[in-house]
């Protein structure tokens, strides 16, 4: 899987905006203060709404599927480009060394482990990797944290946003690749339409992926991190459940522990979960 990066100012601004509005977690804006304040928050909201309603496109991120994303953005969304250029927020220069360091950290870790990643994705999930992964990298205002989110996919390409704090690599050089693997799982689940649409299906998907990455079964197998303890994962599941409402995720947690314990050969996670009665939440028809 080819990995490329975008650090263009306009796409980084878009990444910030989607981080605030795209996941429906407006409190994230408080963490970005004072970058988004006053009229800038209203302009950003206008840009977001325009970005998800471009005729004949999924969203503004379709520009990233082209050879020249910057030129395609101007072509399909000139009004958005104008508003982005008028969005007065502080933005780190594109040639800041932090971006080169983060790119190298992700590329090196992935290239060293690409075969293992591909094998695990196939054996556990039944997934083939995308042909290309595009990562929009910007600097996060929280210096010791990083934050990823899925932006767009098509059959061959996934676009992921990654905001990284300036101290993250010093704190943990494996954190970027672990966050990227978490978001890659979101992108692959979307590509194969695995999770059926039901009330708070996003909660179900998040609880499932958290078991594997960024600090779970997948990243442990790759040697990036010790897996979160059963108690820690159960605590995360409880937090997600309390935040989003009652979901079948407590039962899901138990099934994931059983899967990990039994280590079934030749059976994908989805087949295992189907046998456990989760077929009303998952659809594997696109894996065939």
Image: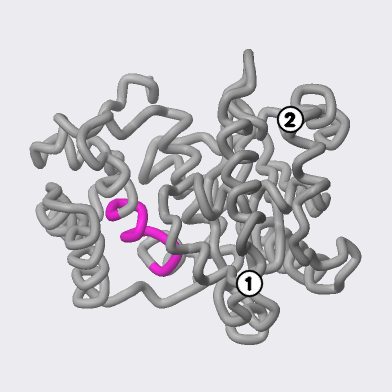
Measured as percent of width and height from the top left, residue 222 is found at 50, 64
Earlier in the chain: of badge 1 and badge 2, it is 1
Q: Nearer the viewer, residue 286 or 235?
A: 235
**Which quarter shows the C terminus?**
top left
Residue at image point 52% right, 63% down? 29
**Which quarter shows the N terminus?**
top right
Residue 197, compared with residue 202, is above or below; it is: above
Judged left or right of residue 232, residue 56 is: right
Helix, strand or loop at disc 2? helix
Span colored in magenta: 207-215
**C-alpha gap between disc 1 and disc 2:** 29 Å
Measured as percent of width and height from the top left, residue 279 is found at 16, 31
* Residue 261 can be seen, yes or no: no
**Are there few (<14), some (14-19), or many (20+) residues within 10 Å of tag 1?**
few
Q: Identify the image quadrant of residue 54.
A: top right
Judged left or right of residue 185, residue 263 is: left
Helix, strand or loop at disc 1? loop
Q: Is residue 211 magenta?
A: yes
Depth check, mark 1 against mark 2: the one in front is 1
Circle 1 residue:
34
Residue 44 is tagged as none
**Are there few (<14), some (14-19), or many (20+) residues within 10 Å of tag 2?**
many
Residue 40, compared with residue 195, is above or below; it is: below
Q: Is residue 5 magenta?
A: no
Circle 2 residue:
63
Residue at image point 25% right, 47% down? 204
Measured as percent of width and height from the top left, residue 192 is found at 42, 28
Q: Identify the image quadrant of residue 47.
A: top right
- Dots 1 and 2: beta carbons under 8 Å? no
- Count of residue discs: 2
């Amino acid at each position: 899987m080819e990995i490329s990066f975008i650090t263009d100012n306009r796409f980084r601004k878009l990444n910030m905006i989607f981080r605030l509005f795209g996941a429906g977690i407006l409190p994230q804006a408080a963490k970005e203060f004072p970058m988004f304040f006053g009229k800038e928050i209203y302009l950003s909201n206008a840009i977001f709404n325009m970005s998800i309603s471009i005729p004949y496109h999924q969203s503004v991120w379709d520009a990233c599927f082209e050879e020249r994303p910057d030129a395609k953005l101007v072509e399909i969304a000139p009004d958005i480009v104008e508003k982005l250029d008028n969005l007065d927020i502080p933005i780190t220069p594109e040639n800041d060394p932090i971006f080169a360091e983060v790119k190298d950290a992700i590329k090196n870790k992935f290239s060293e482990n690409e075969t293992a990643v591909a094998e695990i994705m196939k054996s556990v999930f039944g997934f083939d990797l995308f042909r290309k992964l595009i990562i929009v990298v910007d600097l996060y205002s929280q210096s010791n944290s990083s934050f990823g989110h899925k932006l767009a996919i098509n059959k061959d390409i996934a676009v992921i946003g990654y905001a990284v704090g300036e101290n993250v690599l010093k704190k943990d050089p494996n954190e970027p690749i672990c966050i990227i693997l978490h978001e890659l799982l979101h992108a692959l689940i979307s590509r194969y339409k695995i999770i059926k649409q039901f009330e708070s299906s996003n909660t179900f998907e998040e609880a499932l992926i958290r078991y594997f990455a960024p600090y779970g079964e997948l990243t442990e197998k790759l040697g990036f991190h010790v897996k979160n303890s059963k108690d820690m994962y159960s605590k995360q599941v409880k937090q997600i459940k309390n935040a989003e409402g009652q979901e079948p995720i407590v039962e899901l947690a138990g099934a994931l522990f059983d899967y990990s314990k039994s280590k079934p050969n030749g059976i994908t996670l989805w087949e295992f979960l189907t046998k456990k009665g989760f077929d009303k939440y998952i659809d594997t028809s696109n894996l065939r």
